[in-house]
Image (cartoon, rainbow, N blue to C red):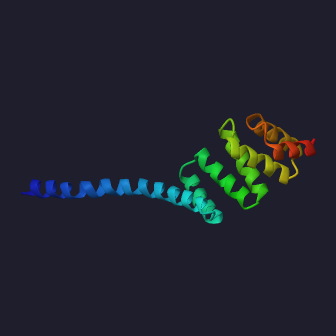
Amino acid sequence: MRYAVVHIAIMILMPIIGYGQESVFSLLKNDLKEADELYGKSAYYEAIDLYKSQLNKNENASIMLKIASSYYQLNHMKEATQWYQEYLEQEDDLKDNNILEYASALHGNGDYENAIVWYGKYLQIHPDNLEVTTILWQLK
């Protein structure tokens, strides 16, 4: 009889324990998904808060990139530059749009030498971009 009660209790608790673990992971995913949705809706301050909370749980370079881009969109160039630099400490390079954002953030912070380097990288990918060509010419 005692064995049957223990067996029944285990059968009842196993799905609950498994659900608890699954829900913790799904909560982490849901916060990241919510942050991405906020970013997509240009709610950058709220997105930054969620991204930073995710970064504390899961240090992921792509989250750093989203934080950097969010700060850029808010015209907080100092913070954007800092987060792009943190991202670049973990990853080798940036993609198209992020290269241009980083170059613009550096430019906005008065770091013209590094801005020239990153505008140059952007022009290697998009050599026909007259706006960036003009900016680069003016900086030189």
Residue at the (15%, 56%) spot, across then down: 6
Q: Nearer the viewer, residue 67 or 119?
A: 119
Residue 13 percent location from the top left of the image: 24, 57
The quarter of the rendered structure image containing the C terminus is top right
Residue 131 percent location from the top left of the image: 83, 47
| Residue 53 shows in this picture | no
| Residue 1 shows in this picture | yes
The quarter of the rendered structure image containing the N terminus is bottom left
Residue 10 percent location from the top left of the image: 20, 54
In this figure, what is the number of numbered marks?
A: 0
Rendered image quadrant of residue 125: top right
Q: Nearer the viewer, residue 94 or 53?
A: 94
Residue at the (84%, 54%) spot, across then down: 108
Rendered image quadrant of residue 89: top right
Seen in the picture, residue 134 relative to 40 is either above or below; the reply is above
Residue at the (38%, 57%) spot, across then down: 23
Apparent side of residue 49 relative to residue 101 in the rendered image (left or right):
left
- Residue positioned most to the left: 1
Q: Nearer the viewer, residue 41 or 58?
A: 41
Apparent side of residue 1 relative to residue 58 in the rendered image (left or right):
left
Apparent side of residue 27 relative to residue 99 in the rendered image (left or right):
left
Q: Nearer the viewer, residue 106 or 133?
A: 133
